[in-house]
């Protein structure tokens, strides 16, 4: 999986940078300068995560607008039978999106743990990760609300369609009896 490779790559890079920092410090370089490559990696990672946070925030806005649309459809008589997700494909797609977001959340937390495991602490890293986790959690909560709204909308829409179908069915004809006069006349 891509995320596992990313975590592994960053973990390996962090270990190499930690060894380099130790060698530079032993060689007499001031600790601030010896740690500079670690700070650069952290800055690059935080910049990347801020971009991902912004993109996931836009995804959450789209999910929220879909949620508003489903709620609006459910409020209006004509819209109540629109957009029925019979095969649950929309709900399944939303679930897949949630799983992907949660996997990214775990990778983010793992990378933060890796930085911490080598003794690296940064407010920038902590704030960036917290912002990412918050937007992922908000997105997942909105996606769950959308799934529930879709399920409720579908349940009501199918009930309305069944009721409409029953109204339009003709009443069963009463059984008719044939006159027996033809058999008696012979």
Image (cartoon, rainbow, N blue to C red):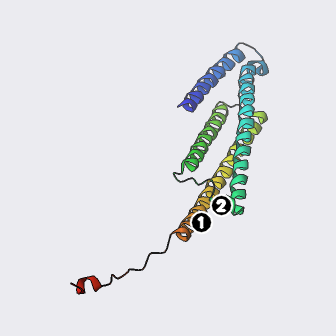
Tell which residue pokes out farthest to the front in this image: 186
Q: Do residues under tags 1 and 2 come within 8 Å of each other at their CB atoms?
A: yes
Front residue of this view, candidates 75 and 162: 162
Q: Quadrant of residue 101?
A: top right
> For the point 65% across and 50% down, which residue is it?
143
Q: Is residue 111 above or below residue 181?
A: above
Q: Which residue is mark 2?
A: 80
What is the quadrant of the C terminus in the image? Answer: bottom left
The image position of residue 141, as x and y in percent, is 67, 52
Label 1's element? helix
Label 2's element? helix
Residue 74 visible in this rendered orientation of the protein? yes
Category of crowding for the residue at label 1, using alpha-carbon neighbours closer than 10 angstroms: few (below 14), some (14–19), many (at least 20) = some
Front residue of this view, candidates 185 and 152: 185
> For the point 49% across and 75% down, which residue is it?
171
Tell which residue pokes out farthest to the left in this image: 186
Q: Which residue is mark 1?
A: 160
Tell me the CA gap for discs 1 and 2. Answer: 8 Å
Residue 121 visible in this rendered orientation of the protein? no
């Amino acid at each position: 999986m891509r995320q596992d490779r990313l975590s592994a790559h960053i973990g390996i890079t962090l270990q190499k940078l930690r060894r380099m920092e130790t060698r530079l410090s032993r060689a007499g370089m001031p600790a601030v300068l010896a740690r500079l490559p670690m700070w650069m990696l952290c800055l690059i990672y935080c910049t990347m995560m801020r971009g991902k946070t912004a993109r996931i925030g836009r995804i959450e806005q789209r999910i929220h607008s879909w949620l508003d649309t489903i709620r609006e459809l459910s409020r209006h008589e004509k819209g109540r039978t629109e957009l029925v997700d019979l095969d649950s494909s929309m709900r399944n797609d939303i679930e897949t999106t949630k799983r992907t977001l949660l996997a990214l959340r775990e990778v983010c937390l793992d990378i933060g743990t890796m930085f911490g495991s080598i003794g690296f602490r940064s407010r920038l890293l902590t704030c960036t990760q917290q912002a990412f986790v918050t937007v992922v959690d908000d997105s997942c909560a909105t996606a769950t609300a959308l799934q529930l709204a879709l399920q409720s909308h579908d349940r009501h829409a199918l009930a309305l369609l069944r009721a409409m179908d029953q109204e339009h069915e003709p009443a069963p004809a009463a059984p008719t009896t044939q006159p027996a006069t033809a058999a008696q006349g012979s």
